[in-house]
Image (spheres, rainbow, N blue to C red):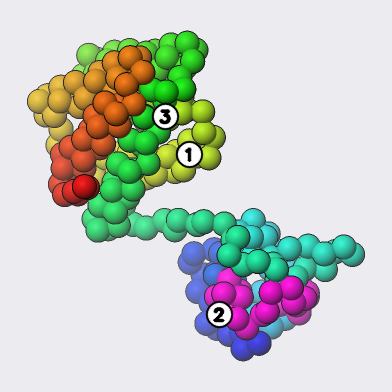
Amino acid sequence: MNLPGRSNIQRQPALAEQVAEILSSEIISGAFAPGMLFPSEAELAQKLDVSRTVVREALARLKQDGLLETRKGGRTKVAENLSRRALRLEDQNDLDLEWMRHLYELRAIIESEGAALAALRATKKDLAHIKSAYTELEKAIAKGGLGTKESFNFHRAVVEASGNPHLTKLVDWVDDKAFAFTRTNNLIVDKNMIDSAQAEHEGIVKAVQNGDAAEARRISREHIIHAARRRGLNISLP
């Protein structure tokens, strides 16, 4: 094991995050074989010259990511099947436009399918929730606001109606980053842009209410492509 000393670890981001990244790279590179016992907290703390608390936090993340497992007796080992490790999407600076463009592209792909599933699976309760979220968005805009928070809630209501909790969690993460981009970049939004977005939102509501999966998918995808363009991000999908 050829781990770096503390002199190679920066204070930002958090030490635990840095240690987790170092150990993750060692595991993925093959320095630790699947099923192999992992060094103890004390060993790692001494080698990396950090506290055991930092190491403990780093190991907890690696277990969450599916890279490490706890054996009977409390010892930690490398996961037997590393292909099962958790998907992890790293944060980037909100000003990284290329990263944000890819994020909107991902959003268009997954949210449109969520809307299609909502059209097929939405219950009466789901439909009422979607309609209520849309109404709250209308009210926020009527008061002169951008309705950013309300728009987030509307999109979440639609995807929740898909009945797939994993999809909802993924969309939550993606949408949170996308809407943060709107909040932090002081984008100039005129009335025409808001009206266009609202017309698209209304189209999604109607398609889901009508049980039209193809139309819900189409409008949702076009809406997010247009939303990206309104923010200066050009994306195109087949």
- Nearest to N terminus: mark 3 or mark 1: 3
- Give the magenta range: 23-44
Q: How far across and how far down the image is residue 133, in percent?
A: 38, 18
Q: Which residue corresponds to mark 3?
A: 117
Disc 2: which residue: 29
Q: Are marks 3 and 2 in contact (CB under 8 Å)?
A: no
Q: Please, what is the three-letter code of the amino acid marked with disc 3?
A: Leu
Gap between marks 3 and 2 measured at Cα: 39 Å
Identify the mark nearer the N-term, 2 or 1: 2
Residue 29 falls within the magenta-colored stretch: yes
Separation of marks 2 and 1 at Cα, in angstroms: 30 Å
Q: Looking at the image, do the residues carrying marks 3 and 1 touch, with CB atoms under 8 Å apart?
A: yes
The residue at 54%/70% (across/down) is 21
The answer, for residue 5, to whether it is visible in the render is no
Query: Which is nearer the eye, 184 or 108?
Result: 108
Identified at 21% across, 35% down, the residue is 222
The CA span between labels 3 and 1 is 11 Å
Q: Quadrant of residue 113?
A: top left
Identity of the amino acid at label 1? Answer: Leu
Q: Is residue 5 left or right of residue 111?
A: right
Q: Position of residue 79 (x, y in %)?
A: 69, 67
The spot of residue 145 in percent (x, y) is 24, 23
| Magenta-drawn stretch contains 231 | no
Residue 135 in the image: above or below residue 236: above
- Give the SS element for disc 1: helix
**Which residue corresponds to mark 1?**
167
- Residue in view at x 29 percent, y 23 percent: 204
